[in-house]
Image (cartoon, grey):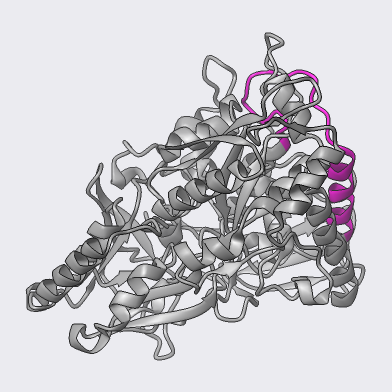
Amino acid sequence: MGRRTPWIKRSAITGLLLSIALLSCRSSSRPNQTNTLHLLTPTDPKTFNYANSASVPNVFLFSHEGLTRENGATGEVEPGLAEKWEFSADRKQVIFTLRPDLKWSDGADLNADDVVFTYNDIVFNPKIPIEAKDQIRVGDKGEFPKVRKLDDRRIEFIFPEPFSPFLHTTTGGRTGSVAILPKHKLEPLVKTFDGKGNPKFISYWGTDTPPNDLVVNGPYQIESYITGQRVIYKRNPYYWRKDSDGKALPKFDRIIWQVIENQDTQLMKFRSGDLDIMGDSRPLKAEYYALLKQEEKRGNFQVLDGGPWSGVFQFVFNLSTAKDASGKPFVEVKKSRWFNMKPFRQAIAYSIDKERINTNIFRGVGVVQNSPISVQSPFFLSPEQGLKTYPYNLDKARKLLTDAGFKYNDKGELFDDRGDRVEFNLITNANNLVRVAIGSQVQQDLKKIGIKLNFQAINFSVLVGKINDSREWDTHMIGFEGGVEPHLVSNLWLSSGGSHSFNLKQQAGQPEIKDYAPKPFEVEIDRLFREGAREFEPEKRRKIYSEFQQLIQEELPLIHLVNDRAFMVVRKDIQGLNYNGLPFWGLWNIDEVYRK
């Protein structure tokens, strides 16, 4: 979601407008390919192995489906690979019935064996670090359901207790939940191991894999990939869905997914006719929205406003007190002391001017955030409903710090009670110019309360490696996808979760860490998520998740900042879109999209 910084010069704006005007004259040059859709991705694919996917956008948005499907317009769960399901009276059992005659993209039958294999051999496998694993841990012990085949089309799931989010956890690649994987291709790789004792499956289907070796069940399969340039998809001839007239979906024969990191280049590509859509996987930046809105009629495209984006954007503290295998703390001891003081975290929250971020960087159309739950969710708690907030207030910030034992020198610089200058680092991804701009403002804001913040924008892959692997970071800013079901982000909030970055536990396949311990409020978060998951009554669930939101706002392991509105620009001949800010992918119904 890169965006230009707020201090951009007038001459730069003028130049950008001139470029748009010139490019609008070239719109006739766009390729006349009725059955090809031209899209973009800001980064190269990280993997072709669904179990290794941990970021969006990814290739699996186009290619991998689950037992169910989430309607991106309503948030409701609909039939997917399974045509129906039935819960037992006590809600501890559900039986799915697959559609008849399902097939994989290589023509092999897709049946109950694939479903049982996906869950028992991959998702539940402790040696495979698939993120969706955390979504379906049940109860106090974090148990997985028992899964067994009843016949070729029916699969039984038995839970140790009722588990209300389950249907949302089976919705596949378009929501980042469990997608069904091919047993006939992957079983041998799950059951053989490398020199480190890890299943060979983990290193299988990397981005160097020949596309003909990839087997999928979604509307599209990869035809070719050129690093740094493009991924080309072709229709999966065995895809199961049909339109209302009984014609096979998807409607486009091919998709060309261009890799374009720089957002100014993305804009130029769209205006020159090389792209059909911008803003489908990340909202269109506010600056471009204003410019393109003026060009809609002449450019023969439309700018869509889908309302608030469902994701969240966070400033995260590293609260870990754990050590690596050699006994070295992941976080410098003095910094760990600061970060683990709640008044210190709250002071930071009061010192960040979110309204200024929205005005200067989002042009006033962003969404100031306070809750860890998406605004579209029925469980969202607003400040008007009593959610605690931290409006910009430097006096409160300074008082919290001095009451906690911090002191100021005559230059206004902040020191702790042991005489150490308060100085720490903030990192975010360099390819997202909005985050870079926000980081610069946060740096300025914290300077006003005497804190020296060293801000660095780095490569996204390096950022993820620091957060998830080396754990060598103080604070970072990153976005997370959201949705209507809070449990789908349990991997962020559960203390066992693979994305629980503010106090990350040792994960499968990682080197040993020592002295890990959850904080008391993390134990309480675990309890609330377990209660929310076992409760089916909406009002009771709302009360539980309200308590969770208040707990996060009180403890502040991370600070919610400002997020996008869901802006997307689309050529007028592209039809079939059903767009709002709810799904984390604007083309959630990609199989129904067509060119008029």
Find residue 474 and report its image quarter: top right
Q: Residue at x 71, y 62 (%)?
A: 391
Magenta span of residues: 503-531
Residue at screen point 72% across, 18% down: 323
Rendering coords of residue 588 (x, y %): 47, 71
Residue 41: x percent and y percent?
34, 56
Q: Out of 350 and 82, give the one closest to the viewer.
A: 350
Q: From the viewer's perspective, is 159 left or right of 214?
A: right
Residue 311 left/right relative to 536: left
Residue 84 painted magenta = no
Using the rendered image of the protein, determine whether residue 560 is visible from the camera's viewpoint: yes
In front of the other: 151 or 15 = 15
Name the image quarter holding the C terminus.
bottom left
Relative to 533, residue 55 above or below: above
Q: Residue at x 65, y 64 (%)?
A: 369
> Residue 518: horizontal and vertical position, in percent?
83, 34
> Count the marks: how many?
0
Q: Is residue 187 above or below residue 218?
A: above
Residue 526 is one of the magenta-drawn residues: yes
Q: Nearer the viewer, residue 51 or 445?
A: 445
Q: Could one spot residue 135 in this view of the protein? A: no
* Residue 344 falls in image quadrant: top right
- Indicate left or right for 223 with 418 as reference: left
Q: Residue furthest top?
A: 326
Occupied quadrant, residue 398: top right
276 or 304: nearer the eye? 304
Q: Is residue 483 above or below residue 538?
A: above
Q: Residue 173: image x %, image y %?
A: 51, 58
Query: Quick check: 305 above or below 529?
Result: below
The N terminus appears in which quarter of the rendering?
bottom left
